[in-house]
Amino acid sequence: MRTKTFLLIYIGLFATTLTSCATSEKDEGKAALYLQIGNDLLAQNNYPEALTNLLQAERFAPDNPVVLNSLGMLYFAREKYTTAADYIQRSLKAEPRYTDARTNLGRVYIAQGKYNKAIIEIKTALKDLTYNQPEKVQTNLGLAYLRKNNYLAAKEQLHSAIKLNKDYCPAYNYYGQTLMKLKDYDSAGGVFDRGIKVCQNNPEEVHFLSGLSYYQMGRKEMALVRLREVSKLYPASEYAEKSRSLLKVIEQDKK
């Protein structure tokens, strides 16, 4: 799933320093250790072990915003969006200025189809000029507009995200998708091609969308190249099957 693959990019890895009061210094140390282990396992997509450790961190620091935010994003990865939102809301209740949690809450709302609520949270996050991942906030705002079918607004936000960080993979992915919705296939192909170079997470989707954009603009040979790359490089992915299906269509067209 896209949400799982892009999880690392969308959550970042939170600092393990606890900012709220634990019951004792000893408990604070234990919570910090479990949090670090849990986040490391979360980064590896080892969700069961990550959950075990993050729940232990919560046991020692039940009101810590960083722990609650991490648990929220773990449940987001497992597509338990209601539980994810509950945890992140608790995180923000503990620390209303926690911009990463507010940005993540917006992302969860997008997954729930609550686009207007997402936009409110993300625009609030944008006001924090000290936040060190503004491209993440801008991308989430663009994604909310994309899902709302407001493609011009999405294009503006996603283009801004790429200007902020030319190595931020999700911005390329969603920007390219937006351009395809606007039927600007030539530009979309270029965006996806740049995305292939920077995307370490979910490159198979960007590869597939690059092939699809080339097909839409009538450049069938380039489409074949990209789609064959997906099948060769990522044979077990869902996009390999999609690529094989589209390859058959293109090969039939050539006959």
Image: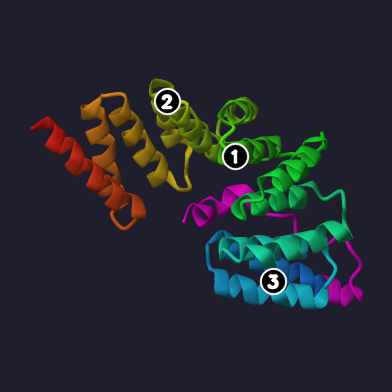
Instruction: Pick whichever of labels 1 and 3 is earlier in the sequence.
Output: 3
What kind of element bears circle 2? loop
- Part of the protein shown in magenta: 1-28
Query: Residue at label 1?
Result: 148
Q: Tell me if residue 1 comes above or below residue 9 in the rendering.
A: below
Query: Residue at label 2?
Result: 183
Q: Residue at x 65, y 54 (%)?
A: 108
Residue 146 lies within the magenta run: no
Marks 2 and 3: in contact by CB < 8 Å? Answer: no
Work out whether residue 239 or residue 193 is closer to the camera in this orientation and state it.
239
Cα separation between marks 1 and 2: 17 Å
Q: Residue at x 31, y 58 (%)?
A: 236
- Quarter residue 149 falls in: top right
Name the residue type under label 1.
Lys
* Residue 36 can be seen, yes or no: no
Query: Residue at label 3?
Result: 54
